[in-house]
Image: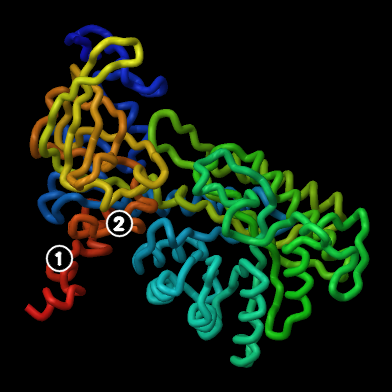
Amino acid sequence: MQDGSAQHGSAPRAHPLAPSWLTARRDTDDLEAALLPADAHRDAEGRLVIGGVDVETLAAQHGTPLYVLSEADFRARARSFREAFSAAFAPEAEVDVFYAGKAFLSTHVAGWAVQEGLCVDTASGGELALALAGGVPPEKIGLHGNNKSDAEIQRALDAGIGRIIADSLDELERISRLAVAAGTRAPVMLRLTPGVHASTHEYIATAHEDQKFGLSLTPSAGAPSTDADGTPSTPANPYLGSPAWTAASRALQLPGVELRGLHAHIGSQIFEPAGFELAAQKLITFLASLHSAYGVELPELDLGGGHGIAYTEADTPRHPESIAAALAATVKQACAEHALRVPRISIEPGRAIVGPAGVTLYRVGVQKDVQVDAPDGSTTSRRYVAVDGGMSDNARGVLYDADYSAVLASRRVTGDHALSRIVGKHCESGDIVVRNVYLPTATARDDLLAVPATGAYCHSLSSNYNYLTRPAVVAVADGASQVLIRRETEQEMLGRDTGFAAG
């Protein structure tokens, strides 16, 4: 039998079941520096400290599983995107950075975003309500969604938010009707699908044609050679007859609609700038066609985002300055080629602000070594390490085959490490938190594990599967912790069951 561990004092060797990118190790110092929030370190006792608070103190005060969010790291990342993009597009255009409410939103976090000069994206009436409750100025809020209800549109109009991102012609007509009835004009941006395929998971690539979001730039089969108002097709307008062109033409005519600009989002967890640049070029060509046909220069352009973060050592995200410089150069050049002013620019970094600022803490429970046939024909063992949470607090592994890493957080252990799979306590074989990670062989029951880069989409996607209560979210800063979202109690969870409530 081969276990892939290293004898004390010898160089560690790769386990036969380990993916090629995973480094066999005897300590996790380099991993922690790359993946944990910037204000994380080990104290003299070897405990992980985040925001000046050690993890054992956090676990004792707030229980586990526990979402921990570094306020300083969040704020620093928000500032870095705002400053990098503002500098790159100056002096031609101003830039708005939209924080992705769907990644993680609470009233406190909404306040942090505004204090750092960001706007806030929402994708439902509930997220909109929370952003408003968090004190976000309405003009700094956008509302997304491919199937907005009339009630959600009405809430946006009543609040006076800065933009409604329309996803369909049907929605445009309803926005117009509701705005006219309310005696107002709705600030609208059209979400277009530029047909740029991002190198990411199929379910988070959102600009290819075969999906639910946006208005295609591709003309429909049998589309007329003139627009609804008689505008003829020309070589300069390749979009005539496309759903996007039809919607834009209609938006310019509808009462109660103020067409502010165009929006595109090619996906999430994207590392390379080429896709963003190509999408921007297509949007600017579309802007130029609108200008040629109708004599209007739309004042805003939202270039989306979804910038990638490091979940494991295999991920190499770009710095905001690099992304901004490449995108600004493309936009400025494309606008110059079409004799257009550079419009006001918006970007949506997505998980890149809150994702790396978050860590999830778990307590270790049962461990077992399972014999597995290796690809080379040998028999080896994989260690299964069960924790007190799982797919109810991090569903991304089940949804997207997402990879994470982990470190032993309650103490420092160097020496032999075993290839491990961290699993949850749910009644599902797919309940995997971390697929492959080297953990110390000395890892024991009640040790704390920290899973980095869980600030985005973990709490947002959390559930009560198997009737587990949802964890608390605490912020740490300057040696103190603050509860942002308190831990759910069993009484609260079960209280929606009318029989339980009656009893």
Q: Position of residue 177 (x, y in %)?
A: 64, 86
- Image quadrant occupied by the C terminus: bottom left
Q: Regarding mark 2 in the picture, which secondary structure is present there?
A: loop
- Image quadrant occupied by the N terminus: top left
Residue 420 vs 129, above or below: the answer is: above
Disc 1 marks which amino acid?
Thr
Residue ID at (17%, 78%): 498
Q: Which residue is mark 1?
A: 489
Residue 377 vs 325, above or below: the answer is: above
Q: Position of residue 431 (x, y in %)?
A: 26, 43
Residue 185 vs 237, above or below: the answer is: below
Q: Which residue is mark 2?
A: 462
- Is residue 269 visible in this depiction of the protein? yes
Left or right, 165 with respect to 238, comes to: left
Q: Give the numbered dot on residue 325.
A: none
Residue 463 vs 41, above or below: the answer is: below
Q: Position of residue 403 (x, y in %)?
A: 37, 36
- Is residue 135 visible in this depiction of the protein? no
Q: Quadrant of residue 180?
A: bottom right
**Furthest-left residue in view?**
503
